[in-house]
Image (cartoon, grey):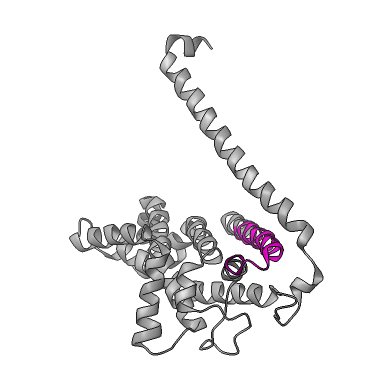
Amino acid sequence: MKAYRRNPFSFLLLVLVLIATGITVFILTTIIGYILIMGIPNISPELFAWKYTSDNVSMLPAIINTIGITLLSLLIAVPLGVFSAIYLVEYAKRGNKLVSIIRITAETLSGIPSIVYGLFGFLLFVIAFGWGLTFLGGALTLSIMILPLIMRTTEEALLAVPDAYREGSFALGAGRLRTVFQIVLPSAIPGILAGVILGIGRIVGETAALIFSAGTIAGIPNTVMDSGRTLAVHMYALLSEGLYMKQAYATAVVLLLMVVGINALSAAIAKMLARG
């Protein structure tokens, strides 16, 4: 306290930080508590039936679609984002104007609302390509949406690797390609996975981009060229109809648990890789 008496401004900053933390925790716990209180009593076995009907309003097809579209989107976006970041950090010349433009563009694209990506996916995949509302179109739209995020986080993770690692590898006779994939990239994996986790969270909770590209059909698509809805879109559809409010709250609980589970699993994998 003596230090704070000498510098009252530091004490004021401490109070402001504590107040902001308390408000944030209160809002977060209130939202989670409201979802759990309203949703848990409405969870029933009928909500997990294999086939959706207007009677059971099953969310199981939407859960399967969410997992499928998440994996497909990551399969497209992660390699592109990681390889792009590797080029920008390891191969492009320092001070290159093109690299600066790419970074500014990626940061700008990260802040664009998802509805814009949905309209872009609708115009490109649904109208221009003539696919209609498809699972593949939705996955490609989400891939474009999370690509800047994965690229920027991967780039920051690569930049955080000390140059001594690279210099030591070069001194032992390793080439640039081997240095990147055997020395630099393994050291940056925890940071890369952090970006992937953020991308997963955005995919799982996305609605606007998928409504215009993947559609809202309540069923499991037979192929990637069929339409299907994810869990977030399923909840939005139930709320917009106004007839299944209880089921919508139950869906929100499952969606919340799914996001927490995916983040926990990803964090555990990141820790395992960091220890290894």
* Residue 267 located left or right of residue 155: right
Above or below, 125 against 271 in this view is below
Above or below, 269 against 22 in this view is below
Residue extending furthest toward the right: 45
Q: Position of residue 142 (x, y in %)?
A: 45, 71
Choose between 140 and 96: the one closer to the eye.
Answer: 140
Above or below, 273 against 45 in this view is above
Task: Determine the residue positioned at 37% across, 59% down.
Answer: 110
Q: Position of residue 70 (x, y in %)?
A: 55, 72
**Which secondary structure type mostly characterizes the magenta part of the structure?**
helix
Q: Position of residue 166 (x, y in %)?
A: 37, 57
Choose between 27 and 66: the one closer to the eye.
Answer: 27
Give the quadrant of residue 81: bottom left
Q: Is residue 81 visible?
A: no
Task: Determine the residue positioned at 58% across, 70% down.
Answer: 237
Residue range of the region highlighted in magenta in the rendering: 239-266
* Residue 192 located left or right of residue 251: left
Task: Determine the residue positioned at 42% across, 57% down.
Answer: 153
